[in-house]
Image (cartoon, coloured by chain):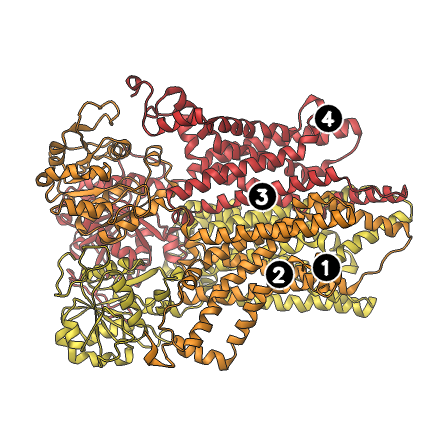
Chain colours: A orange, B yellow, C red
Amino acid sequence: MNKNSSNIMALAPHTSNKRETVCIFGTGDFGRALGHKMIQSGYPVVYGSRSTQISNLIPKDAEVLSHAEAAQKAAIIIIAIQRQHYNFLTPLAEVLHGKVLVDISNNLKLNQYPESNAEYLAQLLPGTKVVKAFNTVSAWALQSGTLDASRQVFVCGDDVEAKQMVMNIVRALGLTPLDKGSLLAAQEIENYPLQLFPMWKFPIFLSLGLTTFFFFYCLALDIIYTYIYEHRNFSFFIAITIPNRICPVIALILLALVYLPGVLAAIIQLYRGTKYRRFPDWLDKWMLCRKQLGLIALAFASLHVLYTLVSPLRAFVSWRTGKGIISQALNNKTEPLNNTNAWLSDSYLALGILGYFLFVLLGITSLPSVSNNVNWREFRFVQSKLGYLALILCTAHTLVYGGKWFLSPSAYKWYLPNIYMLSLVVPCVVLVVKFVLIFPCVDKPLTQIRQGWERNPKYSE
Amino acid sequence: MNKNSSNIMALAPHTSNKRETVCIFGTGDFGRALGHKMIQSGYPVVYGSRSTQISNLIPKDAEVLSHAEAAQKAAIIIIAIQRQHYNFLTPLAEVLHGKVLVDISNNLKLNQYPESNAEYLAQLLPGTKVVKAFNTVSAWALQSGTLDASRQVFVCGDDVEAKQMVMNIVRALGLTPLDKGSLLAAQEIENYPLQLFPMWKFPIFLSLGLTTFFFFYCLALDIIYTYIYEHRNFSFFIAITIPNRICPVIALILLALVYLPGVLAAIIQLYRGTKYRRFPDWLDKWMLCRKQLGLIALAFASLHVLYTLVSPLRAFVSWRTGKGIISQALNNKTEPLNNTNAWLSDSYLALGILGYFLFVLLGITSLPSVSNNVNWREFRFVQSKLGYLALILCTAHTLVYGGKWFLSPSAYKWYLPNIYMLSLVVPCVVLVVKFVLIFPCVDKPLTQIRQGWERNPKYSE
Amino acid sequence: MNKNSSNIMALAPHTSNKRETVCIFGTGDFGRALGHKMIQSGYPVVYGSRSTQISNLIPKDAEVLSHAEAAQKAAIIIIAIQRQHYNFLTPLAEVLHGKVLVDISNNLKLNQYPESNAEYLAQLLPGTKVVKAFNTVSAWALQSGTLDASRQVFVCGDDVEAKQMVMNIVRALGLTPLDKGSLLAAQEIENYPLQLFPMWKFPIFLSLGLTTFFFFYCLALDIIYTYIYEHRNFSFFIAITIPNRICPVIALILLALVYLPGVLAAIIQLYRGTKYRRFPDWLDKWMLCRKQLGLIALAFASLHVLYTLVSPLRAFVSWRTGKGIISQALNNKTEPLNNTNAWLSDSYLALGILGYFLFVLLGITSLPSVSNNVNWREFRFVQSKLGYLALILCTAHTLVYGGKWFLSPSAYKWYLPNIYMLSLVVPCVVLVVKFVLIFPCVDKPLTQIRQGWERNPKYSE
């Protein structure tokens, strides 16, 4: 690194240090942006281009030469051209021999080609040291300096020294290199910028589906039913009342769905008598998106909290409260405090507060920087013990809230149950099965199985 | 790294790259899980085992050989056996000479042995390069791929190259290696997965103790006293009213306890006239858990906010409000707005909101990823300046809230003060002493002492 | 690293490992603190000092020698003296030749000298390997062990091996080294600890200015006007009512200012017909502090939420509610529910809740640990799509809230508009221009320009 193999020296502002010349093949957008940034950071830059005349777009301090000439000036060559033109590099194989080629290309689709662009380049030019880098950085962000999402530059390559050289450049540009290992990782690195929250897709679609179903369910029972049978127009329930019924229901169901796969896995392991057979694919996938399910549940729970807390500010609620007080005043009597009601109302609110509090704690613990600072035992303690406690509290909150209406026929409009009853099915199943699983007679064999014991060793994979 | 010293090559799916063979001693749970993962990542794996017949549990693509044969095939040997069996490795000393041994073992208790397992291994086999790694990863997480808490793999060892080789494997498995330096760090790394929030223990026990004390105090004054002397049953106060009295009290006391040790340290330094003598142990420990104390205080403050905000939804509160309005209506008069009351109520709420807002800001700043992005000056500004401002605001909030009752005898049931009066003791002491400490005549010598000046240089350590 | 070049060995507690001797020039505060910590971590430490008699302050296990003698004992020399005394090192050039010098100095002002201290040191002693490190760590924090803000140690230097040696020491002290590249980075590293939220200055001053302006505006309209013309004293509005008017207004304006520069940039690019000319400086700076503007907007929005949610607890609000109910009761009539009012009140609250919810989501995404885990496409999706949605919801929230008063003359006290009308100007402009920009006839040329197309290639830079 300290020996400068090129004969062109850069004198960066305020410094007396020398940086190695970097060659960039291709004068497209990203090539120019990268060149600009490198010159700013004190690197001499030389462009390799078919035509040396488009120079007014190219950074002023950069040289533009033919590909072969440019390649000779530098030890590192950045290949800022598209994969479909890589084959034009084969005639240059001799010049490029032993050089570090930096593949910065991206594809338009996930897994567009059988092998990654970087591996393809390495196959085309076997004498070179190919390093994959910079593909997650956008040209726009590089030029404007707003690099919030992309300070990390994934780097991979088979030659450790070549990788080190590239990582030094990455650092010099103010970015953070992240060594992802050998060139095998290139496929993953190339797929990375094309992803749009892949782990979130299923949880989001599931919650959207549930939201739609429960919205129409509530619309029918709370607005249409009231309009038909009581001739009252409560259409404004769409804004707050109905969302505030849907949110807690979905939050509770999603939270229970976070813990259901763990319970199912335990049952499967107990039934099979071994842990060495793979779970069904759907269960594996479900387990992998538990964090996302939990965070979406937290989002719905937070909306529920906000919707609930604003209720005293609603015109409808003030009107209803006023009506109740006025009717008492006009009848000249004050109702005494109903102690049972006070207990129910307070304990339902307290359970909700504590459940939500634990839920937020779980959410904070799943922040990457926090979960990186706890060990496995601590993470399990929070996510499992506190998680179950949150589920118990939230289920109890729903039970206490709606308990008194379970047996009242007026709660069953059109013979359909209220949605908070529907919301209790999954959490109650999870809690009951979990309760059975912690009995010693069930827990002991399960623990043995998880430690590697097998009921029928022959049948294992 | 690029030269493959073994004669067995792995052809990982979709790749043409070669990875070095890795040998694993021990076919237990972790050995198998690690082997599986390595084969997935393109490493040829060979197991060293006493019996070569338990092969149906071992990953299909792995070879199983005797220990000596297996060790010869690889440069890196993962020792997936327990410490008490390490001595069986001594006969293999010759075969293992010069090899990289990866110690992945964990103990059952903190500091179980005088030296760490890795150092013990290095003593047993002096010709080998021992690297400690992987002990913080669980076999279960490795197999299932849910690695939220354990992406970080602590690595330590005396041989830099050996460590580098192991770190490359760690990266290839999709984990993040963290170099902790020489083998000296092995003890710490082995203790790490056994910890369960060690820094949180004292703050949690302290707050639980305070909670219990204040709970019974409130129970006596608010429920039992009322029941005995006024024959009214307010048992439902247990759900919300009493928690909402305890939470702010504990939050304020804990917040004050965050700033008390700093004030005590300043007094000790002023008294001693030097900063070069160590503080008493209890003060050192107290200072180290200030962050945890503050975060628990924030948790109690957040509960207080939630309990307060739901109060308009409580049946008891609606009943009390209604009763007040009805009695006015029945008396045919409307009370005019009491301007003093409006001022007190609004300023008490505003002080609480601003105090809580700053408190949350402090909490966000203590998130690892945020505090890593601020420099020392910025961190001190937030945690000290804004922290004291939060303490002042929260103390003022409590004073304004309860101020009018200080002199009223009815506030002293059974001659005991209300708990918000108790909660003011520590914060007021801290604020008064801090106020004294910022006077120039006190601040100047203190600053000098902190810059290294000593009153009696002879008496210093 | 494994060969110990000095003849003094340290036997750190519980270990049998040897660490290289480290020499520290200078027995000042930081030199002593660092020495203490190094001895604790098992390093033999030797001090170089003019006088060898101040030894009672120096860690007991350290040796104190003359500069030349001390330097000979170690390969690494930490220069714990101030820049203005660096020239005394020149006579030692021969002894120091080939040694690793660690520059730990800081300046008192930003860019105090033309070149960084480390580069100055490297120029003074050309035969040495200068590494910049440790300057971001405070002596106080090093001694007390409370290293929350400064676990990161920025390291830079031209010699890779020397840097590696220093980084190993950093790790051994329990700190995290961060390689910032060559010695060119020293200036930046030396400026780092002197900064106090440099990116936050403009957004904070802007919001303070707006707060002051709107505070006096509201004071005039809500308190002074009412006092003069209606002879009512609403001075307590200062505590909650007025802050709760100012906060949402500033939050909305700042949120719009986050998206305004993007819109302006698009207009400038469309007008110029090229993206290759730099934006004006003020626009560049504005774009770089968008994140800070957004977070301050979020802080104001959060205060608005808290102020709003406590309103049912305010004495003034209870009094007003009670008065309304009593007057109805005394008139013996119950007002029916006004459906339009219920719709307006509910939809205004619902819009606010959803807008705030998205706003918090944006805030969480801008946490460093979260934004490091999303790719550029995901970051843009959240910050641009969800951000505009939040802006639309918050603008709609304000419009629905105040819509009915726009045409009412009583809303214009002293012919001045209410402040929520003022707050709508910027967001409406941004949304209207953005709406125009997404029309195909405007969007198409803009996309082309952003992909590198130019209307008049000649005129480009």
Q: Determine the CA span between mark 4 and mark 1.
A: 45 Å
Query: Which residue corresponds to mark 4?
Result: C408
Q: Determine the CA span between mark 2 and mark 4.
A: 48 Å
Q: Does residue C150 appear in the picture of this structure?
A: yes
**Image marks 2 and 4: residues in contact by CB distance under 8 Å:** no
Q: Amino acid at mark 3?
A: Leu
Q: Amino acid at mark 1?
A: Ala
Q: Residue A112, percent across and down?
A: 29, 45
The answer to whether C239 appears left or right of A9 in the picture is right
Q: Amino acid at mark 4?
A: Ser
Query: Which residue corresponds to mark 3?
Result: C354
**Image marks 4 and 1: residues in contact by CB distance under 8 Å:** no
The quadrant of the image that shows the N terminus of chain C is bottom left
Query: Which residue corresponds to mark 2?
Result: A422
The answer to whether C364 appears left or right of C334 in the picture is left
Query: Which residue corresponds to mark 1?
Result: A411
Chain identity of mark 2? A
Depth check, mark 2 against mark 3: the one in front is 2
**Image marks 3 and 1: residues in contact by CB distance under 8 Å:** no
